Amino acid sequence: MDSFGNDIKSRTFLELAGELEAMGEKFFRARQLYDWMHCKLARSFDEMTNLPKQLRERLDREYSYTSHTLVDRRISGQDGTEKYLFGLWDGNVVESVLMRYHFGNSVCISSQVGCRMGCSFCASTIGGLTRNLLPSEMLDQVYSIQRLTGERVTHVVVMGTGEPLDNYDGLVRFVRLLSDENGLHLSQRNITVSTCGLPDGIHRLAEEHFQITLALSLHAPSQEKRQKLMPVAKKYELEEVLDACRYYFDRTGRRLTFEYSLVSGVNDSMEDARALAALLEGFPCHINLIPVNPVRERKFVAPETKRVAAFKNKLEKYGKTCTIRREMGRDIGGACGQLRKGYMEKQQS
Ligand code: SAH
């Protein structure tokens, strides 16, 4: 058994084929089973009608099969963005978001229940980390949304609750299964993983031969400022994190994205923009500016639109490419992680 216990949907096709063979089953049964799980998006063994009942019963006895329940679904009247709250087998809930763009449907998924990184502006970390999600539980977020909408998911960003590199094995298996040609076969180029910057994890990821995009949550142009916003920065010097990012680029040839959440009066001055451009001088990258989403428990506010635009112009003057992240689904549940938080508070009261 590997580290994902008896969770059948986290198995690779080869693992599954080997295990079914050991049960005395023909090779094509593994194909059928994998197809039911990862193409037809079955929610239980019961749905797999072309598998003999006896085999289905045996699988049900020997494996666990994850499947989300829909706890809440909110559809934005403004831009068609949808926020989902899914219930897991153990009573925990995770949040996922569907965003519709001209280039396709993008789903933002969570990688953990809660988070232990402690970023000062983030709602997802307030209750700490409960547990890692299994690869299947990350897939289920994509699969459920595809089933519920009947629309193909073309892009996935691992930018919801959790630090993906703190669930390294789960993340890597998730990427493999999601891009597997026997499953949904999403292009790895359409998968983005966002990290707060764990150098060991970035180094390891660089060796996986993936074509995914790595996004680094930078949020400040200096070590001093960064560690005020992100406790994890106290553990890893900015230089060490950026060296890991350079290594990632060298190994994969994939241009990185740097995320920079703009907080009024904290990291949004023209001097910050200049320092940021200098820090990333010569680095093939894209900067994504995110006016901070207000979180009830925190005092941070976003700069005015004019100031955000000035920050972007300054970066562009120094030759950096950058975009301002368009806020989507404003009318349906506030900032990242707040739908889940609101739900948990209601449960407790
Ligand atoms: N743990 C990962 C992914 C989770 S969050 C990471 O740190 O990258 C995805 C992005 O949203 C990160 O850049 C995170 O710092 C940012 N973020 C979190 N809360 C935010 C908020 N209230 N406003 C703006 N950005 C936020």
Image (spheres, rainbow, N blue to C red):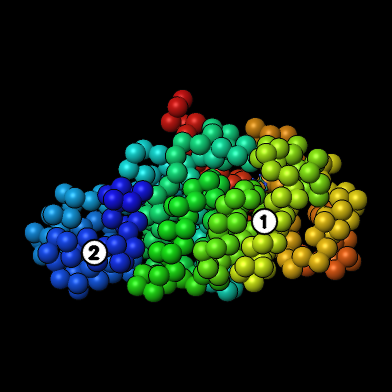
Res 34 → quadrant:
bottom left
The front one of 86 and 129 is 129
User: Along the line of sight, which residue is nearer the eye, 289 or 19?
Assistant: 19
Q: Measuring from the top left, give residue 317's x and y in whole percent.
A: 89, 66
Q: Earlier in the sequence, mark 2 or mark 1?
A: 2
SS type, badge 2 = helix
Type of amino acid under label 2:
Gly
Dot 1 surroundings within 10 Å: few (below 14), some, or many (20 or more)? many
Query: Quick check: 239 above or below 323?
Result: above
Q: Position of residue 67 (x, y in %)?
A: 32, 52
> In the orientation shown, which residue stands out farthest toward the top?
349
- Tell me the residue that label 1 is attached to: 244
> SS for tag 1?
helix
Question: Looking at mark 2, is its residue's CB closer than 8 Å to ligand 1?
Answer: no
Q: On the rendered structure, is 53 left or right of 199?
A: left
Q: Which of these two is toward me, 319 or 239?
A: 239
Q: Residue at x 34, y 63 (%)?
A: 12
Q: Residue at x 47, y 55 (%)?
A: 171
| Residue 230 seen in render | no
Q: CA distance from mark 2 to mark 1?
A: 36 Å
Taking the view exactly as shown, the residue that stands out farthest to the left is 54
- The circle on residue 18 is 2
Q: Residue at x 70, y 62 (%)?
A: 246
- Is residue 220 visible in the rendered structure shown here? yes
Please identify the quarter of the rendering in which residue 100 is found: bottom right
Q: Disc 1 marks which amino acid?
A: Ala
Asked if residue 339 lies left or right of residue 253, the reply is left
Label 1 C-beta lies within 8 Å of the nearest ligand 1 atom = no
Left or right position of 166 against 218:
left
